[in-house]
Amino acid sequence: MDDDDFRLDPEVRRDLDAAWDALDDGDLEAAERALISARSAASDDPAVLEVEAELALAREDPEAALDAYHRWNDIDPDDPEPWMGSAEVHLDFYGEAGEAARVLRQLLAGPQLDPLDEAEARHLLGLACQEKGDRKGMAKEWLAVLRLDAATDPEPLMGAAAFEQVAAAALDELPDEILTNLRNVTILVEDRPSESLVLDGLDPRTLGLFHGIAMPDQSVLGPGPATGLIHLFRRNLEREVEDAEELAQQIRITVAHETAHYFGAGEDDLERFGLN
């Protein structure tokens, strides 16, 4: 619970909790009802505006989301959340990478951000630079993200040995006919991507990576002694989950995705291989 939660009227807090629960369940009508109730008592509270923006995004109404973010920003210009929310709308809904980058650079030029917020802002700015074709700008921001993430890592959810055991078990769960073709593929567990991979254009928060010769591209004479390597980025995976059980599931999902890449598949082909 953050400081804003303490200053909210308990009834408004209950309405907002109900709205978030409804959004999680995909019940947009229930979320709207709860939001209307909260808004009647605290229309200009940032916590209310946050839900308003999220509901607008769920309804694919970017204009309404931007309006909520702008009002939130007017109330609390030092809060980085509405800045980053606005940048994401420009980037994801309008394809306006230049405007997203402008908003994020303005945020980063302002008061010193918390390292976690700075990492989020620079990661988004890297995405905007990538979309613009600015590889130099992308690399600069993403190398900064790499360093900031390493400096703010939470306590590990499981030890390295346990992580590797879960990854190996996830591989063993694949169908036998797939495992036969994976005999020359190694799983390598690392904390996060290397600087060289990021300089080559890899998102520093990537969860996994297949590196090597995909099966459709291998010689008809058969694979070489080491045709592929699946990287699992442990600390990135841990940042995506809340507990060890969720982490194990995310490891399985990532192994499945990267295995699909070994077979030369895209994300849409997972079901065809039984890896969804």
Image (cartoon, grey):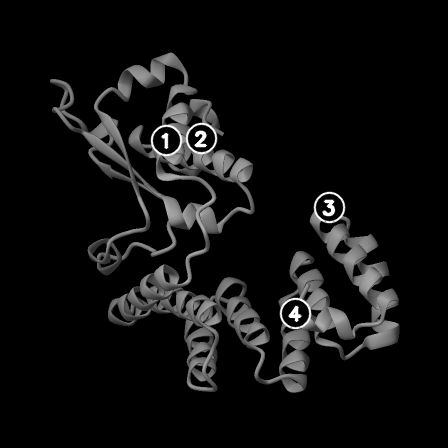
Q: Position of residue 257 (x, y in %)?
A: 40, 35
Identify the amino acid type marked 3.
Asp
Which image quarter: residue 272?
A: top left
Check residue 260 in the rendering and tell me which mark sits there, or answer none.
Answer: 1
Residue at horizontal 24 percent and vertical 19 percent from the top: 183
Query: Residues under labels 2 and 4: Cα distance?
Result: 33 Å
Disc 1 is placed on an element classified as helix
Above or below, 80 relative to 198: below
Residue 58 on image: x %, y %:
67, 57
For label 3, the SS is helix
Disc 4: which residue: 65
Residue 227 shown left or right of residue 132 in the figure: left
Q: Is residue 260 left or right of residue 252?
A: left
Identify the residue position indicated by label 3 in the image. Answer: 25
Task: Report crowding for label 3: few under 14, some 14 to 19, many 20 or more residues within 10 A (C-alpha).
Answer: few
Mark 2 = which residue?
270
Mark 4 neighbour density, 10 Å: few (under 14) some (14–19) many (20 or more) = many
Give the number of the disc on residue 33: none
Mark 2 vs 1: CB contact within 8 A: yes
Q: Secondary structure at mark 4?
A: helix
Mark 1 / mark 4, whichever is N-terminal: 4
Residue at x 71%, y 65% (from the top left corner): 51
**x then y, percent, for residue 153:** 42, 57
| For marks 1 and 3 on the same chain, the one whose residue lies earlier in the sequence | 3
On the question of residue 207 being in view, the answer is: no
Q: CA distance from mark 1 to mark 4?
A: 36 Å
Residue 216 on image: x %, y %: 24, 27
Numbered marks: total: 4
| Residue type at tag 2 | Leu
Q: Is residue 253 left or right of residue 67?
A: left
Residue drawn at x 48%, y 67% as measured from the top left: 91
